[in-house]
Amino acid sequence: MPFLGRGLRHGAQQRGGRQGIDPPARLGLGDGEVEGERRHKEEAIATFLRLCGQMGRAYWGWSQETWHRVLTTDVATLLAPHRFPASANVSQYVLVVAYLLDCLVDINALSNLRALYLARKVFGRQLLEPPLRAVREVVAKWGYAETGQKSLLTTLCQVFLLNRSPYLEDLTAERLDQFRQGWSRGRRGRLFRLRRALVGMGILDEPMPLPQTHPKEAGGSAGSREPGAHPEWHQWVERWEATSTLVPGSRQRARCVLLAAGRWLQKQHPEITSPQQWDRNLAIAYVAAVDRMRVGDYAGSLPHSHARDGQPLKAGSKASCLNTMRAFFSDLQEWCWIPIRFDPRRALATPPTVKAQIGPAPRTIAADLWAKLLWAGLNLTAEDFVKDGRPLYCYPIEMLRAMAVVWLFAGLRCNEILRLRVGCVRRQEQDTIIPESGEMLPKAAIWLLDVPVNKTGTAFTKPVDPLVGQAISAWERIRPQQPALLDRKTGNLVHFLFCYRATRIDARSINGLIIPTLCRKAGISMEDIRGKITSHRARATIASQLFNAREPMTLFELQAWLGHRSPRTTQHYVAFSPIRLGKAYADAGYLAHNLRAIEVLVDRDAAKSVAAATGGPWRCYDLGHGLCTYEFFEQCSHRMACQRCDFYAPKESSREQLLQARAHILRLAAEATLTEEERAAIDLDVVGLDRLLSTLSSEPAQTGDSSGHSQIVHQNRPNCSDST
């Protein structure tokens, strides 16, 4: 007993007096204890004495293995040989003794640790309750339920035990990062939320960074985790990644492509270990290798599985690989890190055959399926998010309904939906006259939605259906107060609209919760003929429906509504409706056009042979007042002077008109005083009329019969002489 008391006091002296912990008093050696608690503490002290006697040495001579066995084994089991009864609560007090003796080195190694109860026994309720109450009040305002609050308080007690102080002011960001090492993913998430609460309380001054896992943290260094490429190539890739200004996701994708290129070099060109050694010939060889590459090639020893393993890369994947390599070498040359030995834009250009396979292919959702999804989104209830009797979410139904309506009606990218700000919608409050057309837009016909900075442009405002504004307003009315969070794209602290429990909703909430629930409620599959239904397919579907509406939006109007920089990008989202194409095809009259051609179709060779035998024309074009025997009638440039043409053949029905015209011209020449030029013109007309009358007196032109001897083609019908 005396050595135990001295050890307790010695441990307290080493920790200092800030904690205000008197180990003998905390173990129940003072007055005023509840009889049950005092008995448990005395049993714990007796347990240590018996264990010391059992092992034949004092507790300060125990090894770490002995301490771990003592603290992880039930006390009753340890004392079973001595037939010493021990209650269930004795184990907690054994941990308290080990903690106060500085023998509990690794708290995280104990699986049976109940941090909340242990902290209360170590620090006492009087010191522990104020910080726990302060943290509970903050997270309760953010929307945490009782269960979530308890998990955060348990994490806070673990941090207090590791920090050996029950005061929030003693916590620092460096200490929290130190405690985070070795924790499981779930515990790191709770520590992340606790740290955010401390930032909201003003305990920590620095903004709370978003949780992210660097590739090196996931499993060692890049070299040991991704073998196959030369270490020097790894160094160049890491140097470029640390300098590039691309967004983190783009840098990570580029890193995978560059490391795959390094593994290709190690296998095909092991003598090449640095970008400095690349020349035009090697770049051309890499382009050819990418063109023949298959899914899974040069993936290294990382575990991976893909449904298309062994199949050729798609054109888009090939172009993406070459784009990454062009950017990599262009940056290295621009930054003067390597000499300019070739032009990456030309040597690593995407082959034309690959470019030809890449074009607009919007993956729109069929109209009937989309209508069912709209109905499901407008009728969402809390019961729709329950599966097998268990809720699938921890969010208010108003927020989930607002997210669903925004996805179904706003035509936004997934990232834009997640980054919407509080107060992003406003209603049109008055009638507005459109200056360009003079039309009036009635009030409350639309709501205006402020879209944040996106990947192709700056922030802009777009009109949306009133349903969107009403759903967002309903969520904002009950939205718990949330702290401002960091927007990684802009670097500003903003209040995100879809934020709950101080956490911004991520893309998994849309693709993994909202869309599956809508499909389940609508009774449709998560996949259709064009693939899986994802968040981005709604954008193409809405754009295509607006383009094919009865009063459609123009391409440039859709460009502004979608927030694109170029109308060429908008074309990738717009697909013609099959009904609209069918109407245009029907109006074109393809069959009727060919039927009219069939009506005048003859056996050309037979007609020519008969015409040659009889000495007459094989085909005549009906001009109404006469016939034209010129074979290339469609190329004739003198159609208005047909009666003077040698290829003109008058009809028998026009004989009387020709005689009347000849008599009229002769009477005009006799009665009128004419000049020499006018007299010559009249004489020429008389000669022409006489020639036409003489033609009618001879054998008339043949008029095409069933034998196909000749053909009369009406002037208002196409020339089908080349058809067979």
Image (spheres, grey):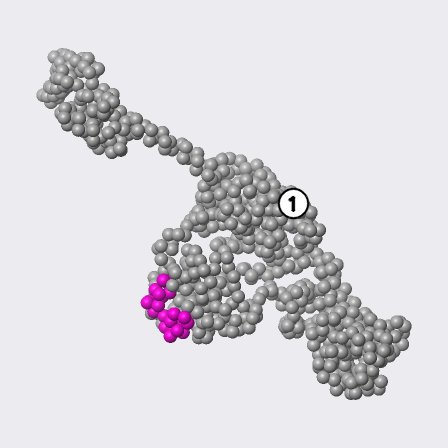
Name the spot of residue 223 as percent of width and height, x first: 50, 73
Q: Is residue 216 above or below residue 490?
A: below
- Residue at (78%, 85%) from the top-left corner? 55
- The residue shown at (74%, 78%) is 69
Three-letter amino acid code at disc 1? Answer: Leu
**Residue occupying the point 34% across, 64% down:** 284
Q: Position of residue 61 (x, y in %)?
A: 75, 86
Q: Measured from the top left, where is residue 203 in percent x and y? A: 69, 68
Q: Which residue is mark 1?
A: 380
Q: Nearer the viewer, residue 83 or 336?
A: 83
Residue 660 appearing in the image: yes
From the viewer's perspective, tell me whether residue 216 is left or right of residue 718: right
**Which secondary structure class fits the magenta region best?**
helix
- Horizontal side of 4 relative to 464 (left or right) equals right
Number of numbered discs overlaid on the protein picture: 1
Q: Position of residue 697 (x, y in %)?
A: 13, 15
Q: Which residue is pictured at 73% across the width and 57% down the height?
A: 145
In the displayed image of the protein, which residue is found farthest to the front? 81
| Screen quadrant of the N terminus | bottom right
Q: Which residues are magenta?
A: 266-288
Q: Nearer the viewer, residue 262 or 13?
A: 262
Q: Is residue 476 left or right of residue 441?
A: right
Q: Is residue 636 above or below residue 365?
A: above
Q: Nearer the viewer, residue 664 or 224?
A: 224
Q: Is residue 221 left or right of residue 597?
A: right
Q: Could you tell me which secondary element the residue under label 1 belongs to? A: loop
Instruction: Name the image quarter holding the C terminus.
Output: top left
**Residue 246 shows in this picture:** no
* Between 194 and 279, the one nearer to me in the picture: 279
Q: Quick check: is 283 in the magenta stretch? A: yes
Q: Indicate whether residue 170 is drawn in magenta.
A: no
Q: Residues within 10 Å of mark 1 (few under 14, many from 20)?
A: many
